[in-house]
Amino acid sequence: MRLDVVTLFPDWFAWFVTQRHVANALAAGHELRTLDLREHTPLSGGQVDDTPFGGGAGMVLRVDVMDAALRAHYGVDPVDLRMQRRVVALTPGGRLLDDRLVDELAREPEITLLCGRYEGFDERIVEHFASDAISIGEYVLAGGELAAMVVCDAVMRKLPGALGHSESVREESFSVALEGRPEYPHYTRPAEFRGWRVPDVLLSGHHEEIRAWRLERSRERGATGGG
Ligand code: ADE
């Protein structure tokens, strides 16, 4: 998979790509590149944003700046780009990210993530350049960069080669294997600590009983909204 992030802060991603599962995915041939909006702005002084029409606080990312950056990088009209690849605008008003959407994105060969800043995007960016608008939660971040990292993190850990054990992706919270419910609890050594014992069944070696116990715990958590 090729993931491109359009951002005013490409440096932020230098740390992100050193994280183990991201580094593993990159070593396995997947790509994560950043595209610096400011490098491509046609405006003087590196300007990328402007005051909102109609008044109000904050600044809005300009549509002509996004147009120039996408056009320079991909060599096509950005209006056509979203026909060739998924172009995702990260915005608090978008479709809420969940495991189903992450799976959907993980199947794409190429994705471009657009990070807004300040008050966000000129709406024409979302309307004409993006194929999707995605939110990572109902709260407002100062920009789309952390949201882009959340998307990249969740998507890249699903890619073959990112995690040591492919089973950890198959049977985890919200997965199809767990019928969309939260994951069962995990325990490790010591088997007893301060009088808190690990459930006996997990020490029993009976794989079928363990499986049944885990499914049951997952169902309980799904019913109570815990986990
Ligand atoms: N940009 C600012 N807040 C955001 C959020 N909650 N999700 C995605 N992008 C954002």
Image (cartoon, rainbow, N blue to C red):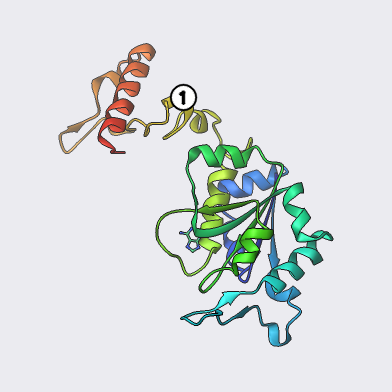
Residue located at (65% from left, 51% from top): 131
Q: Position of residue 82 (x, y in %)?
A: 72, 52
Q: Please, is residue 72 above or below residue 84 in the view? A: below
Q: Is residue 65 visible?
A: yes
- The residue that mark 1 highlights is 177
> Where, quadrant-wise, is the C terminus in this rendering?
top left
Q: Position of residue 112 (x, y in %)?
A: 67, 54
Q: Quadrant of residue 191?
A: top left
Nearer the observer, 24 or 108: 108
Nearer the observer, 161 or 105: 105
Residue located at (29% from left, 32% from top): 221
Residue located at (56% from left, 37% from top): 103
Q: Position of residue 152 (x, y in %)?
A: 58, 50
Q: Quadrant of residue 107?
A: top right
Q: Position of residue 80 (x, y in %)?
A: 78, 54
Nearer the observer, 18 or 168: 168
Residue located at (52% from left, 60% from top): 91
Q: Quadrant of residue 106?
A: top right
Nearer the observer, 174 or 132: 132
Question: For this view, does 101 lie left or right of residue 210?
Answer: right
> Where, quadrant-wise, is the N terminus in this rendering?
top right
Which amino acid, mark 1?
Ala
Look at the numbered disc 1 and give the secondary structure of its residue: helix
Q: Residues within 10 Å of mark 1 (few under 14, many from 20)?
A: some
Question: For this view, does 123 lie left or right of residue 176?
Answer: right
